[in-house]
């Protein structure tokens, strides 16, 4: 039985809005990384670059088991399994995503390496210390940081590396913004400064925090607008008469988030 918060997240990602994300971002459901070397990259290419940055942070090796906590439609898991030769279990609260990820893995002939579970990362259906590594890739703020880290700790082996991306609040983040994102995207964000204590309390050694705000946030809105224009046809098919409103809502949300949040990659080791 899912809690009502988790049910709301599942409804969000099963909805047309939730289904649009992977169409816009090349199967990824996270933001992108841009710098002077890839300034021309579209959203999908930059999302793929951020996935590569995450892959490079993992210490996972061939034959080992990895858990992707909040796996979307499976593109990051597939890229990781191909790059490292590990097997990946992905868990998502969205039935649509679990089905889509499973079909993608089958289409690539990777069903022996990839398994997608419909369930909650707060109650993982697996035994203690089952995995050699894991990540939360733009997902932990939907789950409640402390509970999500405690459950990740339970299923990871001692010494396993955990990587996550998070969107930290800034000194200027407004209370109005926090209420808006709680209501509309069922997310609560914390500050970078909260991480050392949080990791210590949940049984992890904090290895490092890379603040990549400047590589993500200023690029978001212009790149999103380009992508929305390129995908107008698919958006119209998903939303019919409500397509223009859907586009306006996405732009509004991205503007509001890029003004109020940073972006960081956190690396930790299970004690
Ligand atoms: C922004 S998407 C990121 C998806 C994926 N990690 C990626 O980078 O493409 C957030 C993901 O978190 C998942 N999620 C949120 N709360 C969850 C929970 N309690 N248990 C499992 N998955 C959850 C959503 O279903 C969605 O797949």
Image (cartoon, helix red, strand yellow):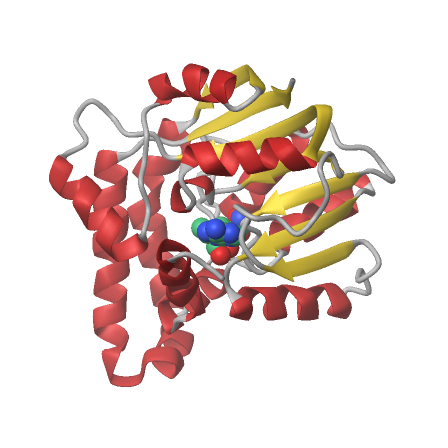
Residue nearest the viewer, comparing 148 with 80: 148
- Where residue 263 appears, as percent x and y from the top left, is 39, 32
- Where residue 233 appears, as percent x and y from the top left, is 39, 78
Q: Is residue 224 above or below residue 164?
A: below
Q: Residue furthest right?
A: 63
Count of numbered tags: 0
Residue nearest the viewer, comparing 270 with 138: 270
User: Can the viewer see residue 246 in this picture?
Assistant: yes
Left or right, 194 with reference to 116:
left
Q: Is residue 180 above or below residue 219?
A: below
Q: Residue at x 73, y 48 (%)?
A: 88
Residue nearest the viewer, comparing 257 with 117: 117
- Where residue 39 appears, as percent x and y from the top left, is 44, 39
Screen quadrant of the C terminus: top right
Left or right, 158 with reference to 30:
right
Q: Residue at x 43, y 63 (%)?
A: 10
User: Can the viewer see residue 45 in this picture?
Assistant: no
Q: Residue at x 24, y 84 (%)?
A: 241
The part of the image, by quadrant, that contains residue 107 is bottom right
- Where residue 6 appears, as percent x and y from the top left, is 41, 56
Q: Residue at x 77, y 64 (%)?
A: 108
The part of the image, by quadrant, that contains residue 11 is bottom left
């Amino acid at each position: 039985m899912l809690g009502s918060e988790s049910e709301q997240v599942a409804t969000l990602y099963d909805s047309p809005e939730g289904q649009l994300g992977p169409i816009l971002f090349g199967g990824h459901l996270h933001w992108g990384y841009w710098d002077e070397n890839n300034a021309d990259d579209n959203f999908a290419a930059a999302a793929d670059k951020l996935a590569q940055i995450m892959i490079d942070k993992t210490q996972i090796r061939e034959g080992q088991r990895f858990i992707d906590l909040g796996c979307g439609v499976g593109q990051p898991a597939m890229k990781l399994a191909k790059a490292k030769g590990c097997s990946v279990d992905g868990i998502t609260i969205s039935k649509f995503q679990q089905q889509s990820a499973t079909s993608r893995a089958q289409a690539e002939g990777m069903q022996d390496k990839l398994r997608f579970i419909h369930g909650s990362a707060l109650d993982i259906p697996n035994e203690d210390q089952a995995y050699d590594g894991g990540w939360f890739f733009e997902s932990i703020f939907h789950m409640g940081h402390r509970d999500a880290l405690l459950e990740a700790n339970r299923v990871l082996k001692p010494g396993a590396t955990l990587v996550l991306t998070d969107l930290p609040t800034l000194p200027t983040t407004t209370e109005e913004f926090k209420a808006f994102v709680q209501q509309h995207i069922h997310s609560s964000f914390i500050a970078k400064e909260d991480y050392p204590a949080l990791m210590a309390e949940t049984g992890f050694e904090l290895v490092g925090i890379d603040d990549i705000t400047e590589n993500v946030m200023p690029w978001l809105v212009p790149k999103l607008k380009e992508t929305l224009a390129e995908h107008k046809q698919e958006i119209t098919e998903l939303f019919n008469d409500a397509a223009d409103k859907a586009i306006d809502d996405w732009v509004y949300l991205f503007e509001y988030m890029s003004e109020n949040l940073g972006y960081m990659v956190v690396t930790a080791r299970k004690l």
